[in-house]
Image (cartoon, helix red, strand yellow):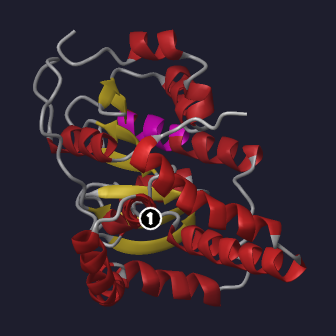
């Protein structure tokens, strides 16, 4: 039987794969346990960083390390290998500096019993959060009290939470109305909701770089759009001048929402990406592209 020839690259590939097949053939129970332990460590690290913007950076570092490992194994790049060997020590020093806030929060999470293996949000809890936010938005709209509420999803908002006043309270309509009562210390800025709890008030959000062409809007609306341009969060904004309720998502905004429509929009987008994919045409009608 003829063996296909792959040239010089094929010989190098064979030189890499042969030891790999040999190692797989020599696996025993201890080796499998060793591999599972390493996998568990990586999994726990990813869980610790979950809920922060550093998770994307960490994933990028892992992917880059895998690519570099494959290239250095397949190609005989001496200078590249030298650079990698000498750069690892510097990287080990840089990682704690880059991830210092996330590492601190991760250690705090380990110290709190049950948070690392916490259960996912229940449907009943999500329904309660949406109901309380809709009640609050309707009351604020009737009184023309400006408000900005941000619902955290898979992209962590901890960097923006840290800019405001920390809170730890269940989502409650009366509390939200109190926070946004005019001239109170916390009314200026955004309330950020994580799961079932309000985690901060008076938080500072990034402003949208480009606004849709539906007229002049204020800073609240620009901030509501800005946070959704950079994350997958959902923003609910109440205009102080007109009392109009709007929702921003994915850099787009739907305005002039009544109670029922606001509830429907939040139920659709706050459930997760899988439900969003189920209603693509509906989304396009509600969130037209900029310039439409």
Q: Which residue is mark 1?
A: 73
Position of residue 190 measured from the top left corner of the image (x, y, whole percent): 32, 55
Residue 3 quadrant: top right
Position of residue 87 measured from the top left corner of the image (x, y, whole percent): 27, 82
Residue 252 vs 144, above or below: the answer is above
Front-most of 159 and 247?
159
Helix, strand or loop under label 1: helix
Which residue occupies 75% across, 62% down?
Answer: 119
Which range of residues does the magenta coloring cover? 134-141
Residue 135 highlighted magenta (yes or no): yes
Q: Is residue 4 left or right of residue 94?
A: right
Residue 49 highlighted magenta (yes or no): no
Front-most of 178 and 231?
231
Front-most of 18 and 137?
18
Q: Quadrant of the N terminus?
A: top right
Front-most of 63 and 236?
63
Residue 53 vs 155, above or below: the answer is below
Q: How many marks?
A: 1
Q: Give the class, few, some or many, for how many residues have Cα within 10 Å of label 1's Cα (few <14, many ≥20).
A: some
Which residue occupies 71% across, 61% down?
Answer: 21
Residue 246 quadrant: top left
Residue 38 vs 195, above or below: the answer is below
Which residue occupies 73% across, 67% down?
Answer: 22
Q: Is residue 45 left or right of residue 244?
A: right
Res 176 visible? yes
Q: Quadrant of the C terminus?
A: top left
Position of residue 175 measured from the top left corner of the image (x, y, whole percent): 49, 59
């Amino acid at each position: 039987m003829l063996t296909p020839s792959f040239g010089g690259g094929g010989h190098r590939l064979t030189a890499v794969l042969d030891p790999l097949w040999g190692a797989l053939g020599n696996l025993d129970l201890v080796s499998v346990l060793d591999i599972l332990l390493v996998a568990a460590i990586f999994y726990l690290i990813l869980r610790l960083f979950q809920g922060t913007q550093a998770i994307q950076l960490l994933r990028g570092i892992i992917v880059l390390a895998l690519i570099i490992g494959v290239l250095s194994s397949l190609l005989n790049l001496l200078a590249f290998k030298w650079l990698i060997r000498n750069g690892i020590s510097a990287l080990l020093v840089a990682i704690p500096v880059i991830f210092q806030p996330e590492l601190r929060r991760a250690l705090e999470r380990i110290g709190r019993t049950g948070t690392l293996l916490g259960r996912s949000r229940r449907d009943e809890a999500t329904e309660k959060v949406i109901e309380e936010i809709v009640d609050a938005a309707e009351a604020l709209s009737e009184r023309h009290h400006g408000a900005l509420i941000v619902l955290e999803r898979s992209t962590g908002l901890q960097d923006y939470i840290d800019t405001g006043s920390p809170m730890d309270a269940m989502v409650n309509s009366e509390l939200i109305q109190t926070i946004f009562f005019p001239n109170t210390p916390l009314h200026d800025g955004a309330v950020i909701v994580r799961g079932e709890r309000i985690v901060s008030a008076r938080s500072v959000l990034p402003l949208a770089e480009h606004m849709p062409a539906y007229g002049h809007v204020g800073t609240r609306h620009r901030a509501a759009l800005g946070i959704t341009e950079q994350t997958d969060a959902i923003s609910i904004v109440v205009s102080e001048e007109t009392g109009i309720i709007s929702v921003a998502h994915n850099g787009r905004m739907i305005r002039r929402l009544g109670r029922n429509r606001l509830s429907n929009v939040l139920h659709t987008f706050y459930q997760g990406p899988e439900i969003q994919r189920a209603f693509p045409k509906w989304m396009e009608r509600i969130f037209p592209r900029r310039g439409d």
